[in-house]
């Protein structure tokens, strides 16, 4: 008598039989494997097909599973799971920068400006370990005490906040608030604006935090891009905030005294935060078309608008000058040629844009 199993095999030759998805069992002679929901989520189609076919994994795959995912799985799984996780800009290298500073007392009796660059730093154990860098220009008024304090302490406070806070903007706000509170405890009657630039180099992410009327302007394919808004008392939203806090705007000044609506120090105007050091934050990702950022005090931007600053930088670079000469020429032009009567300080952050990564 013919074997019925062989007859069935002959009948099935030449036609496709729908494949059922089964889990290997001990009866089939293969050790059973239990897959958690997370493991299914992280496995790739190719890996899943091989698993269904063979019912077993290579040692490398098993090692990967113990770490929570299968190699070759979805590279965006972490970001999809945690939207705040940093994502690299595809096709672009880590952002490299060159930073220079220039400043002049001009015709003032004293120099009240300060500027700062941290160099690269790292946050061990964080989602964004680094490298990071922090750059700032502080435009003091009523003395140099406040701007000097900011140069010495703002970066240190921000570094501490970044180590404990996962939200970058919140870390910036906390550090600004804490430093200003310390200034007021010391009864610092001088004040200062602050324009700062925080860069996470691997993801090319940039946060510009502004207090006062110093300014940050980027150049993108030669076009000026404003990265901050001046905090002036006559700005409608600022005037409304001042009035809600019980202050007045008189002759374009807060309570007839201060020409900026946000500042560090100035503790006599901090009651009910009539004048506040809470920063306005702008976020940007540096693209290959972006060339540089200029941080500057109002001594520069009162005599040159954003487009003129960007155009001048390109003009000096086109003449074959180096980056330090570019910064020096901005200061010299503002004072000597355009008649700025204020201290002038600038920080030029140049993006070293290489070819696309492979």
Image (spheres, helix red, strand yellow):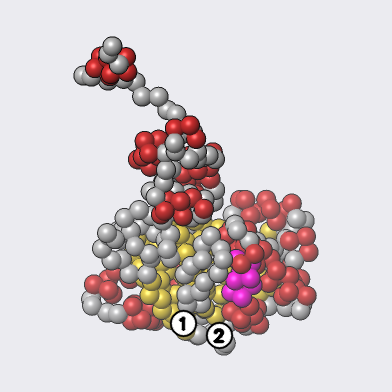
Alpha carbon separation for disc pair 2 and 1: 9 Å
Label 1 crowd (10 A; few <14 / some 14-19 / many >=20) = many
| Residue 272 percent across, percent down from the top left | 78, 60
Tell me: residue 111, above or below residue 125.
below
Taking the spot 64% from the left edge, 64% from the top edge, the residue there is 164
What main secondary structure does the magenta stretch of the protein show?
A: helix
Residue 226 seen in this snapshot: no
Of 42 and 344, which appears nearest the observer?
A: 42
Taking the spot 61% from the left edge, 67% from the top edge, the residue there is 163
User: Outermost residue toward the top?
Assistant: 1
Q: Image check: 190 left or right of 49?
A: right
User: Outermost residue toward the left?
Assistant: 14
Q: Secondary structure at mark 1?
A: strand
Q: Secondary structure at mark 2?
A: loop
Q: Quadrant of residue 293?
A: bottom left
The numbered dot on residue 111 is: 2
User: Outermost residue toward the bottom?
Assistant: 109
Q: Which residues are magenta?
A: 155-162
> In terms of sequence position, does the residue under pointer 2 or pointer 1 come before the other?
1
Label 2 crowd (10 A; few <14 / some 14-19 / many >=20) = some
Tell me: residue 42, above or below residue 145.
above
Tell me: residue 83, above or below residue 96.
above
Q: Image check: 128 left or right of 286?
A: right
The numbered dot on residue 103 is: 1
Q: Quadrant of residue 279?
A: bottom right
């Amino acid at each position: 008598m013919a074997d019925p199993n062989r007859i069935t095999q002959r009948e099935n030759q030449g036609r496709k039989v729908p494949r059922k998805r089964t889990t290997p069992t001990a009866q089939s002679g293969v050790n059973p494997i239990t897959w958690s929901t997370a493991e299914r989520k992280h496995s790739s189609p190719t890996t899943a097909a091989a698993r269904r076919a063979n019912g077993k994994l290579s040692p490398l795959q098993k090692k990967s599973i113990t770490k929570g995912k299968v190699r070759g799985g979805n590279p965006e799984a972490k970001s999809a799971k945690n939207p705040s996780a940093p994502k690299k800009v595809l096709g672009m290298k880590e952002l490299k920068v060159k930073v220079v500073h220039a400043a002049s007392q001009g015709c003032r009796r004293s120099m009240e400006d300060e500027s700062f660059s941290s160099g690269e730093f790292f946050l061990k154990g964080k989602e964004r370990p680094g490298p990071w860098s922090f750059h700032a220009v502080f435009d003091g008024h009523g003395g140099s005490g406040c701007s000097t304090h900011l140069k010495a302490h703002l970066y240190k406070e921000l570094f501490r906040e970044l180590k404990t806070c996962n939200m970058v903007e919140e870390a910036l706000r906390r550090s600004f608030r804490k430093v200003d509170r310390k200034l007021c405890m010391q009864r610092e009657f001088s004040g200062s604006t602050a324009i700062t630039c925080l860069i996470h180099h691997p993801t090319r992410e940039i946060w510009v935090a502004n207090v006062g009327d110093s300014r940050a302007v980027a150049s993108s394919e030669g076009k000026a891009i404003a990265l901050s808004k001046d905090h002036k008392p006559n700005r409608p939203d600022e005037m409304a905030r001042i009035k809600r806090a019980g202050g007045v705007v008189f002759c374009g000044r807060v309570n007839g005294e201060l020409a900026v609506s946000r500042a560090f120090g100035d503790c006599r105007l901090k009651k009910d935060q009539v004048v506040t050091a809470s920063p306005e934050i702008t976020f940007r990702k540096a693209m290959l078309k972006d060339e540089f950022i200029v941080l500057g005090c109002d001594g520069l931007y009162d005599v040159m608008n954003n487009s003129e600053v960007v155009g001048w930088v390109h003009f000096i670079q086109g003449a074959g000058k180096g980056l330090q000469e570019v910064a020096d020429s901005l200061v010299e032009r503002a004072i000597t040629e355009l008649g700025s009567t204020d201290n002038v300080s600038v920080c030029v952050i140049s993006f070293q844009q290489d070819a696309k990564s492979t």
